[in-house]
Image (cartoon, rainbow, N blue to C red):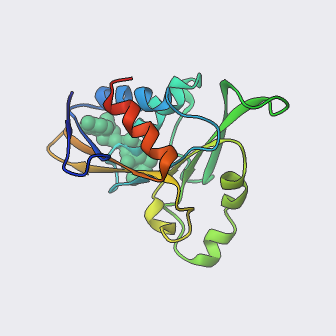
Amino acid sequence: MSQTHTTAPATLEVISHSEAETIAFGRRLGALLQPGDLLLLFAPFGAGKTHLTKGIAGALGVDEADVNSPSFVLINEYETARRGKPGQGRTPIYHVDLYRIETPEALATVGLDDVIAGHGIAVIEWAERAVDWFPREHLAIEIAYAGETDRRIVVRPHGTRAAEIVAALQAGD
Ligand SMILES: Nc1ncnc2c1ncn2[C@@H]1O[C@H](COP(=O)(O)OP(=O)(O)OP(=O)(O)O)[C@@H](O)[C@H]1O
Ligand SMILES: [Mg+2]
């Protein structure tokens, strides 16, 4: 996998050459996450959002085989191996897919408020469906087709916590 820093210093760009490399990048990212982190995924159909999420959740102790598209249920919740603050128990990871959401009214029924307000880690597929709705502090991840099995993954931090995550990725943590 090749990794370059683009002109905007905080933005990280990675080329994945295979499904396995996308999962591996997800694992690196997942290992850096903390309770409250919000990841918004922007990518066309079939680009690799769910496979990236498998790696993210896997690094947090979730069985990657259990992480599948939540298209029909909209939100899957998994318990990670991470402990939150005292009294919070294990940190949940919420895997959300907004593909089917076409109107603000439909969005209101999903239960995203609880996901965002909670102490879990959230990964949102098809964040395009609710782009103006999310808090300003988040990590945006774009995946674009760059060949048959090549994908360009661009990670853009919004806010100081997200910038910390990108800095750690750039440092090779
Ligand atoms: N470099 C790559 N990274 C990720 N997936 C890849 C790559 N190359 C090929 N693939 C294939 O692309 C598909 C990605 O599927 P995945 O479900 O992860 O996409 P998605 O973006 O979540 O799709 P959807 O829009 O339906 O939610 C898989 O079939 C996977 O094998
Ligand atoms: Mg998906």
Q: Taking 14 as reference, is 147 left or right?
A: left
Determine the residue positioned at 72% across, 48% down: 118
Which residue occupies the foreground of this view, 141 or 148?
141
Which image quarter holds the C terminus?
Answer: top left
Determine the residue positioned at 20% across, 46% down: 6
Determine the residue positioned at 53% across, 52% down: 71
Q: Dividing the picture into quarters, in which one does residue 150 lie?
A: top left
Q: Is residue 165 above or below residue 80?
A: below
Percent position of residue 84, x then y: 72, 31
Percent position of residue 73, x then y: 63, 52
Residue with the most extreme right position:
87
Which image quarter holds the N terminus?
Answer: top left
Determine the residue positioned at 51% across, 68% down: 130
Which residue occupies the foreground of this view, 15 or 5?
5
Which residue occupies the foreground of this view, 94 or 50?
94
Q: Taking 153 as reference, is 131 left or right?
A: right
Residue with the most extreme left position:
147
Q: Is residue 134 above or below residue 169?
A: below
The total of numbered circles placed on residues is 0
Percent position of residue 24, x then y: 36, 25
Image-quarter location of ligand 1: top left
Percent position of residue 134, x then y: 55, 63
